[in-house]
Every structure is written in C-alpha cells, then in structure tokens.
Amino acid sequence: MWKRYVLAGLVVAYAFGTWSAYRGEHDAPVADALVFEGMATWQAQNCVACHQLFGLGGYLGPDLTNVISDAGDARVRTFVKYGSGRMPAHPMSAEELDGLVAFLAWVDATGTSRVPEHAVHWTGTYVLDP
Amino acid sequence: MNNALRVQIGTALVLLLLALLIGLLAALSYSFPALGALVSFKHLRPAHVSAALFWIITGATVGVVHYRGEVWRSSTPSPYHKAFVLLWIVAVVAILFAYAGGRFGGREYWEFPPVIGLLILAAWVLLLVDHLRAWVRRTPEPPLYVWMWTTGVFFFLLTFIEQNLWQIDWFRQTYVREITVQWRSNGAMVGAWNQMIYGTALYLMTRISGDDALARGPKVFLFWFLGLANLMFNWGHHIYNVPTAAWIRHVAYGISMLEWIFFINIIRGFKAKLGEYGRHKKGITYRFLVSAELWVFLNLFLALLMSIPAVNRYTHGTHITVAHAMGTTIGINTMILLGSFTYMLGMDREERGKRWLGVGLRIALFGLGAFWLALLIAGAIKGWRTTALGITDHQRVMRPVNAVLEYFVASGAVLALGLGIVAVVLLNRLLGSWRRHQACLHQEDQANWK
C-alpha cells in the first residue's frame, strides 16, 4: 500500500512542478509575429545542427545566444547570406533574414549564455538575476 | 516469438546499423570539409541522431512487449501491437526521407516536420492501450520490472506530447518558457526510455540468477522511487544557465545529489558483483549486462559532477556533455538492448555466433572507452578556454580541441566496427529464426493437407 502513496505523492509533486515551471517567474521579452517567423526559419534551416543557444545544440559552430550584442546584426546578416569558413551560405528572402535576426535578438535579450563567476553561490548553485 | 516482434527487432537492428553508418559519414564530413560540401552536416547530424534514438526506443519497446509476454505467458501478438509496429516503421521511414529531402521543422533531436509526430503519437497510444489491457487482466502484485515498463511507456507518451507543446504560441511567448518546456520534456523523456530499458535489465538479471527477489521488496522499490523522482525533477540541470525561476535550478541540483546514494550502493555491491561475474561470465547476455553496469558506474560519476552548477559552468555546452550522452546511450542503453536481444534470440546456445558477439563486444568496449576519453579531453579543453581563460572567438577556442577530435573520429570508427559486428550477427540469427518459423508453418500446412 505504501508504494501507492509514494507514487501518488510523486505524481502530485510532478503536476505541481509542471504548472509552476510553465507559469514561470521571469521578465524575459515577449515574442512578436516577426520573432515567431524567425523561429520558424531557425527550425526550417536546422541551424541547431551546428549552433547552440544557451549551450544547447550542435558543436560545429559558435554559440549564438548573444551574437547580436557581441557581433551586431549587420555581421549576422552577412554570415548567413554568404557563409564563412565551414559555414555554407544560406540564401533566403529579406523577410526571412529580418525574422531570423529578430529571433536572435529576442534570445539575446533573455540573458547570457555564460554564467558570470559572481553568480556562483558557495553551495555550488547559481544565483542568477531573473 | 511472433512475426510482429521479429519485424520490430529487425527494424531496431537496421536502425542501429544506420546510426553507425551515418555517424561515421558525419564524422568524416567533420574531419574532411571537402566531403562536408558533398553531404552536409546539417542533414547528417539529425539523421544520425534520429536513427540512434529510434534504435534505442524501438529496442526498449521490444523488451517491454516480449518479456511482458513471458511474464504473462502470452506470445500471440494483439492487433494493437501489430498496428503499433506498422505505424512506427512508417514514421521512422518518413523521418529519414524528410531529412534526406532537407525538410526540417522540429526541435533538436526531433528535427523533422512536426506533422510526422502524429504517426508517432498514434503508434504510442496503441502501444499504451495494448500494455494497459494486459496489465489490468493479469497482474495482481506486479514485480518491479513490470512497474518500470509501465511507467516508461506512460511517461514517453506524456513527454512526447509535452515536447510538441511549442506548436501552441503561448508556450514560446518568452524564450525562458520555450527552453524550459523543451528541456523539461527532453530530460524526462530520456528517463522514460531508461525506465523501459532498466526494467528489461532487471528482468534479465532475475532470469539469469533465478532469483525473483531482485525485483521485489521495499529496498528495490525505494531505489525505483528515487529514479522516478530523478525522471520528474532533475531535468533542470540542462538549463542551469537560463534565467528561469530559481527553484528549478535548486530542485534539480538537490535531486541530482540524491544520486550519490545510487553511486555508493554500486560501490557497496561491488564485491558481490565480482562473485556473480565468476559464476555467469560465460553467458553472452550476462557479459553485455555487466558491460552496461560498468558504464552506469562511470557515467553516474560524471553526471554527479556535471550536476553541480559550479562544475556545470565549465562543462555545459562542451564535449563533456556529449561524452555523458554517448556513455548513456551506447555504454548503458545499447549494451542492455543488445544483451536483451542475445537472450531473446538464444545466442548462448549458438557457439559460432556467440564467439563473434564476444569479439564485437570487446572491440566496441575498447572503441567506446577511447571515444569517451577523447570527448572528455576535448570538452575539458573547450571548457577551460571559454570559462577560465574567457576566450570568446570560436576558431581560437577550437584550435587545440580539433586535434583531439581527430582521435575521437578514429575511436568512433573502432566503436562502429564492434557494434556493427554484433548487429550483423544478431540480424543473421533473426533471419535464421524467421526461416525456421516459415519452414515449420510450411510443414504444418503440408501435414494438414495430408
């Protein structure tokens, strides 16, 4: 019988955790239609095969979480259109490119991929600014 | 064994061979950019990952369906099971064709157009219905492996649906929510197939040792609950660096640290395991299962370190994460599944095949060890250069890493050779078993005519 109680307790905690995780407690920027279009382009071009966002994704190219603030959107547009080194050119319409840049700017405004040293708490966890 | 199950095993093994072949091609296109211009990495990576994932998931379902039949004494395939196998194969083929045609549209690891997901969803609902029908009719006090199979099948469906919630705009309104939902579902889904696969490993251990107490009693259930809590709450370690609600990070860190209990338990049981090994080392199934245990030990230690955020700061986004993923999917999941297939196909009674399986296993373990070490070294260099030295230019970061990756490609080829030998031997045996089955049917037909 105790097994059923433990299982039920875990399921309830999981359901509560789901609700809390989805609701969230953060003030990250909200996506608009252009960002959604850019996200669709990111997925259709399968950029994640080679690039990471927040350290999640492929390993061939650089992490692009903060590429807009680090390199600027003009450089991003050039790289996408003409390629560079191992990165092939990705021909796309001006609207698609605008969307992709808007998507990357939206991700960039969320936070930084690298955790600063001062955010590491003595217990080993992070204390990040929301 | 019925024909639906034979087709399912054959599909799983063909997917393993495809994963090895495409993985080799991807590695070569990485090392030789000229080849990369011919076959793009953008196509090869998702094809390799999907073939590997579907090898593991298909293999996991084979274990659930076949051993459930053994436990509940039923080998006749239900129409639900047959329909599951059919839809599942159609989905896998559609995914591989979509990649070949350059049609993407999903998320990392599931990068196919989301409409194909409907086939997977329908197939899995059939599998769940089939499983629950059998559960309700036959099990008054189920052993732990039956609980593990059931939670695995149930959570896979739940996490697969969750993984597709991004198609509703609200779930990607902010990037924090979007990435939280994605990695929550991905992390828990790995836990779901692990439940199915570890359930199979536990079942095989009870059969080999003849001791059913291994799957009953309060202690084994307590450990299972701990594993289940990990499935439900430790996914947060994937997104430590994302500014989510702080509790997600703290809960994941706390739950991950409970895994030290598993680790200490493995060390405590080490002496007893050595005695067991002496008794069963000639059995090929047992050798695959022991290999998986070795990798559980190594990978759990790595996972424990990576779950400490202060350490994760150096390892996240580096090849150490890949080492962990490869150690789990190849060292643990693949070893258990191959061991399970050797048991199903009665390889211990077939001397020549058993010898080749032993050769393949030794080559694969050697290759995997070298492969894993190469990834750890590459990841350590990358983590040090990006986090400790603060180098931001990708080319500069990767310069010393690329030399280690050549060694990684070479060890990957050795690993592929070893696993390839095992898969071919098993496919050959499967084909032989199908031919014998057909011959028996033919003889029965002739006898009936007479």
Image (cartoon, helix red, strand yellow):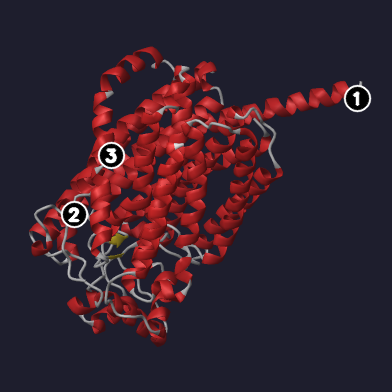
Query: In the rendered structure, which disc, 2 or 1, sits on the residue that comes first in sequence?
Result: 2
Please state if B389 lies on the left or on the right of A49 as rendered.
left
Seen at 54% across and 31% down, the residue is B141
Give the image location of residue B348, x and y in percent. 50, 18
Q: Which residue is mark 3?
A: B299
Query: What residue is at 20 percent from the left and 45 percent from the top?
Result: B305
Q: Quadrant of residue B116?
A: bottom right
> How many numbered circles are shown?
3
Q: Secondary structure at mark 1?
A: helix
| Image quadrant where one finds the C terminus of chain A | bottom left
Say if residue A8 shows up in the picture. yes
Identified at 18% across, 54% down, the residue is B309
Q: Amino acid at mark 2?
A: Pro
Q: Of label 2 and label 3, which has the lower sequence position?
A: 3
Above or below, comparing residue B391 to residue B201 in the picture: below
Front-most of residues B401 and B440: B440
Q: Secondary structure at mark 3?
A: helix
Q: Which residue is mark 2?
A: B309
| Closer to the eye: label 2 or 1 | 2
Check the image and report above or below for B324 versus A92. Answer: above
Q: Where does the image place residue B178, in percent across and percent down from the top left?
A: 37, 69
Q: CA distance from mark 2 to mark 1?
A: 72 Å
Q: Do the numbered discs 2 and 1 sit on residues whose CB atoms are within 8 Å? A: no
Residue at mark 1 to residue at mark 3: CA–CA distance: 59 Å
What distance separates the C-alpha of mark 2 from that of mark 3?
A: 17 Å
Residue B449, numbered label: 1
Mark 1 residue type: Trp
Q: Residues within 10 Å of mark 2 (few under 14, many from 20)?
A: many
